[in-house]
Image (spheres, coloured by chain):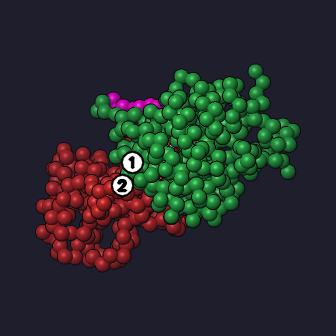
Chain colours: A green, B red
Amino acid sequence: MKNLSVKIGDLVFRNPILLASGTVGYGNEISEFTDLNKIGGIVTKSLSLKPRKGNPPPRVVETASGMLNAIGLANVGVEEFAKNKIPYLKKYDTHLICNIAASSVEEYVECTKILTGEEKISAFEINVSCPNVKDGGLEFGNNLSAVAKITESVKAVTNKPIIIKLSPNVAKISEFAKVVKDSGGDAVSAINTLVGTAFNIRTRKPKLFNVRGGLSGPAIKPVALAKVLEIRSKVDIPIIGIGGITSWQDVIEFMIVGATAVQLGTINFINPKASELMIKELEQFLIEENFNNISELIGSYII
Amino acid sequence: MFITDAIVENKTELENQIFLLKLYSPEISRNIKPGQFINIRASENNFPLLRRPFSVCDVEGDYFFVMFKIYGEGTLYISRKQNGEKINVLGPLGNGFNLNDNSKTALLVAGGMGSAPFSFLTKIFSDKKEIHTFIGGRSSHDVIQYGLKNIYISTDDGSLGFKGNVIELLKNKINNFDKSELKIFACGPTPMLKALKEFALNEKIECEVSTECGMACGFGICQGCPIQSANDENKFLLVCKDGPVFNVKDIII
Ligand SMILES: Cc1cc2nc3c(=O)[nH]c(=O)nc-3n(C[C@H](O)[C@H](O)[C@H](O)COP(=O)(O)OP(=O)(O)OC[C@H]3O[C@@H](n4cnc5c(N)ncnc54)[C@H](O)[C@@H]3O)c2cc1C
Ligand SMILES: Cc1cc2nc3c(=O)[nH]c(=O)nc-3n(C[C@H](O)[C@H](O)[C@H](O)COP(=O)(O)O)c2cc1C
Ligand code: FES
């Protein structure tokens, strides 16, 4: 038996495969396809203090080997989540990471306070990088002192690990990772989606109601890998790699450039069994390459 | 819901660029209802990336049918599938038409490819109620009559049937029917559904419509397919999970 488990701070994940925010709702639909007990963890859709209706359609459009989304953080809000979604997730022996999005530092703090008492929640992932809302979102993710302030403030109201989800839409992502570390953050997730757009050439209108959206899927994988590598080479903080993963080979590649764990996003829409299927293949790879622990791969790149 | 490889049993080009695929899949065929859909993976590679949604057109035993028009890359890839090839499908998805209502006569109203779900519905309703079908298209080439009954046709260019749109045709004929026993089932482009909603509400005729929206997942995890609820201003419904079939009273079109 090979050891697939990885550690982020005190959290032990049975394997490095987590499901990304916004691509698995609150777990109930995806659990029809994937046994959540087999994967490392699940990250919820971004939650805000009050429910959010989200943007009008069109919200999604396909682009070359990727897709743009402008959902606008449609979510049920923290209270409804705690009341009606956590009970379902409690049935599963997997890490529940609660993703929070807000339009002010106070709102981040308030959401964290409300949820921190929930035993089932293993950690918080703070979304400072949503490109699809007017207030908050990227405005925070682009601003070093805002990221520092948010990290410190949420850290102060919870004992659970804080993971900051970083935006790739910045010049130097490693500077943001450094600020997270210096402000007491436990890990970073990289990357959220890249800002993009698409237009219809006949009508000359945007294909998304919101005009701009977030690019995800295989098209962004090389960018995501480069961002993870940049953070790994400059800052000593655990990284959760995200962006365009569709195969077990992609998981390994992210770990080699420095990711401790990974999250699968867009692939869940196409093959909601993907996460579970990859686990066996990871084990096979360790056998072939003579590793006992998958964690030996983390940052093992040779340049 | 299943994810399964369906096998192409047969492919027919019904009209220029409009295809009917007969697919073998006991899981899908035995569980799917009229108005539900399946999400097809057009290629095994990353392009086209997302699945493409299609209504179930008909079912015969362990086989189900999909009728589609070549629109862009995804449908082009699907149209190239040969007999014996596998197509990965996810389904059955969404809520289909209400099959348990007690109307005596069903009026099926279709615009263009909107006729796709009605072959199966016609089959299921055949021994229960009288069925009349209204199909509209731009020209005669858009009017597909596969598996339909008692057909009234309209075309924008007048190349077949009534010259005009299908809702005008429906208005012209509505007095031939006893309104108290009618129910309308419709599928087609948004402007058609919009006009139909107004008509059905004015005439006080029960009406269910199958809606469309760009989708990423098809089963409720991406929030990509909102449609405005008519009952709660602060709420979007999801076309893939709450629909695609809705009572017209429940949505803003
Ligand atoms: C529930 C449902 C049932 C359908 N049933 C049928 C059917 O039985 N027969 C048929 O011919 N077509 C049907 N369609 C439409 C069909 O899915 C599209 O024609 C197909 O996705 C086009 O793909 P493409 O790659 O060829 O076109 P492309 O132009 O390359 O891609 C279409 C892309 O546009 C997006 N898109 C944006 N708006 C819409 C919209 N209003 N409708 C569909 N896609 C949109 C899609 O997400 C897709 O990614 C149905 C759509 C839905 C939602
Ligand atoms: C439809 C959709 C909705 C998303 N919603 C959120 C969200 O609410 N919060 C968040 O932090 N990230 C969200 N993301 C970003 C993903 O979690 C992930 O960072 C991104 O999609 C890149 O990974 P991928 O290429 O594997 O999809 C969303 C992505 C998609 C495609
Ligand atoms: S298409 Fe994903 S929620 Fe409807």
Asked if residue A199 is among those painted magenta in the image, a careful observer would answer yes
Amino acid type of the residue that numbered disc 1 sits on in the rendered structure? Gly
Answer with the quarter of the image where residue A38 lies.
bottom right
CB contact under 8 Å: marks 2 and 1: yes
Marks 2/1 same chain: no
Image mark 1: chain: A
Amino acid type of the residue that numbered disc 2 sits on in the rendered structure? Phe
Answer with the quarter of the image where residue A262 lies.
top right
Give neighbour class at mark 2: few <14, some 14-19, many 20+ (Cα, 10 Å). Answer: many
Image mark 2: chain: B
Counting from the top left corner in percent of width and height, residue B232 is at 30, 60
- Residue B236: mark: 2
The residue shown at (64%, 53%) is A122
Region of the chain picked out in magenta, as a range = A194-201
Disc 2, SS? strand
B100 in relation to A182, above or below: below
Left or right: B157 in relation to A70: left
Q: Nearer the viewer, mark 2 or mark 1?
A: 1
Counting from the top left corner in percent of width and height, residue A16 is at 71, 45
Counting from the top left corner in percent of width and height, residue B143 is at 29, 52
Residue beneath label 1, please?
A54
The residue shown at (78%, 40%) is A295
Counting from the top left corner in percent of width and height, residue A91 is at 63, 65
Whether residue B66 is visible to the viewer of this picture, yes or no, is: no
